[in-house]
Image: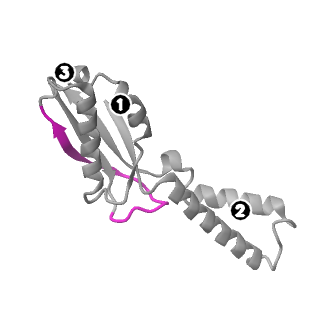
């Protein structure tokens, strides 16, 4: 079994959004404090920035996951199952309750195919999935799968019990 996290947006997009929002917040703080600048009150601004980051999304790596694609295998088949946040709108700051959507793809009879072909089919299925609602515009963190996948014996994995 291999799990691929699904994010609301990429790390780069998230970082840009967060930096813009932090800058807006600190400009508001400077204005609300009567013009006191960061240089004049560095501790206050540092605490305000840390608090804002923590309460408005936190670190991207785990806090921004909105779902999981689990790649499973057995009895000659490989399939993908998804759990996704139960929400109409995916926001940077949200309480999360995951619901199981079930199987989203299945590759039957993988036992006779070479591992590199099986892996290519898995990536193709994930690519198709990314174009479908509710995954369109979401970011699947495929880096670890792309690094490990070519070295895996997918034939053997598919036949595992």
The image quadrant that residue 111 belongs to is top left
12 and 3: which one is in front?
12
**Helix, strand, or loop for circle 2?**
helix
Percent position of residue 109, x then y: 12, 29
Task: Look at the numbered disc 3 and give the secondary structure of its residue.
Answer: loop
Among the two numbered marks 2 and 3 on one chain, the one whose residue lies closer to the N terminus: 2
- Which residue reaches farthest right? 40
- N-term-proximal mark, 1 vs 2: 2
Q: Is residue 80 left or right of residue 59?
A: left
Of residues 32 and 115, the one drawn nearer to the viewer in this rendering? 115
Q: Which is nearer the N-term, disc 3 or disc 1?
A: 1
Query: Could you tell me which residue is drawn at 71 percent across and 62 percent down?
Result: 48
Colour style of the rendered protein structure: one colour
Q: Secondary structure at mark 1?
A: helix
Task: Please provide the residue range marked out in magenta.
Answer: 88-108
Task: Tell me: residue 133, above or below residue 158.
Answer: below
Q: CA distance from mark 1 to mark 2?
A: 43 Å
Q: Which mark is drawn over residue 48?
A: 2
Counting other residues with Cα less than 10 Å from the Cα at mark 2, is it few (<14), some (14-19), or many (20 or more)? Answer: some
Position of residue 39 in the picture relative to residue 139 (left or right): right
29 and 136: which is toward the camera? 136
In the rendered view, tell whether residue 153 sits above or below residue 138.
above
* Quarter of the figure that contains the N terminus: top left
Label 3 and label 1: CA atoms lie apart by: 16 Å
Residue picked out by circle 3: 159
Q: Residue at x 31, y 42 (%)?
A: 69
Quickly name the residue at label 1. 149
Q: Is residue 120 above or below residue 10?
A: above
Is residue 13 in the magenta section?
no
C-beta proximity under 8 Å, tags 3 and 1: no
Q: Is residue 105 left or right of residue 24?
A: left
């Amino acid at each position: 079994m291999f799990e691929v996290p699904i994010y609301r947006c990429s790390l780069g997009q998230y970082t840009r959004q967060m930096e813009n929002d932090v800058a807006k917040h600190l400009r508001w703080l400077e204005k609300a404090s009567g013009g006191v600048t960061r240089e004049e009150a560095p501790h206050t601004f540092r605490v305000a920035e840390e608090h804002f980051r923590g309460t408005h999304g936190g670190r991207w790596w785990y806090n921004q996951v909105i779902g999981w694609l689990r790649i499973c295998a057995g009895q000659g088949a490989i399939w993908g199952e998804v759990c996704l946040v139960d929400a109409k709108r995916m926001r940077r700051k949200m309480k999360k309750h995951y619901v199981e959507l079930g199987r989203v793809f299945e590759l039957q009879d993988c036992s006779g195919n070479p591992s590199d072909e099986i892996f290519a089919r898995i990536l193709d299925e994930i690519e198709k999935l990314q174009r479908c609602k509710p995954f369109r515009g979401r970011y699947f963190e495929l880096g670890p799968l792309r690094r490990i996948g070519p070295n895996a014996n997918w034939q053997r994995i598919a036949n595992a019990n």
